[in-house]
Image: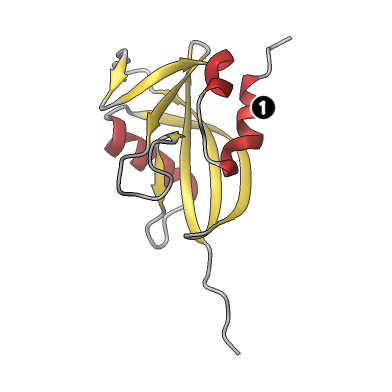
Amino acid sequence: MTSAAKPERIGIAVVEHQGRYLIGFRPEGCPLAGYAEFPGGKCHPDETPGRCALRECLEETGLEVQVIDLLMHRLFTYPHGTFDLHFWLCRPTAKAVVADAHKGYRWVPANELKSLKFSEANGPLIEVLAKPVR
């Protein structure tokens, strides 16, 4: 009897600034190429998903952020693997320089998120983020 592989832990930085979110697009040649994504990636051994989200955001976008809260935690299986996804609400730090674009990532207003093609695992999160604030 074989046991299923342990899900890959992923830390994701859902960076919000002035009602907009930092969004990039997955490159060609990787799973889900062309899909919209938030900065994030695989956790190092003994790294918490929150610390991973901070590290990945800085590596991928050059923007230093701080974790505010865990927005959503999901276990999701794609054809290429099972992932333990941790979506963290983050905001730029006080000393961060916020530009229009950060290494290919750009700011998208919350009301435009649903117009982008995100992976299926992001669906419930996008529904929450795109809801108008009352």
Q: x, y percentage for residue 124? A: 66, 36
Q: Quadrant of the C terminus?
A: top right
**Would you identify the image quadrant in which residue 23 lies?**
top left
| Left or right position of 69 against 30 | right
Q: x, y percentage for residue 102? A: 29, 23
Between 117 and 72, the one lying in front of the other is 117
Q: Is residue 126 above or below residue 11?
A: above
Q: Quadrant of the N terminus?
A: bottom right
Q: x, y percentage for residue 26? A: 37, 38
Give the residue displayed 58% in from the left and 42% down from the top: 120
| Residue, far right | 134
What SS does tag 1 mark?
Answer: helix
Give the residue displayed 42% in from the left and 61% down from the top: 46
Colour style of the rendered protein structure:
secondary structure
Give the residue displayed 52% in from the left and 34% down from the top: 118
Q: Is residue 127 above or below residue 109?
A: below
Give the residue displayed 38% in from the left and 42% down from the top: 33
Residue type at mark 1 is Val
Q: Residues within 10 Å of mark 1 (few under 14, many from 20)?
A: few
Between 29 and 122, the one lying in front of the other is 29
How many badges with numbers are in the image?
Answer: 1
Q: x, y percentage for residue 121? A: 58, 44
Report which residue position mark 1 lands on: 128
Q: Is residue 83 above or below residue 129?
A: below
**Would you identify the image quadrant in which residue 37 lies?**
top left
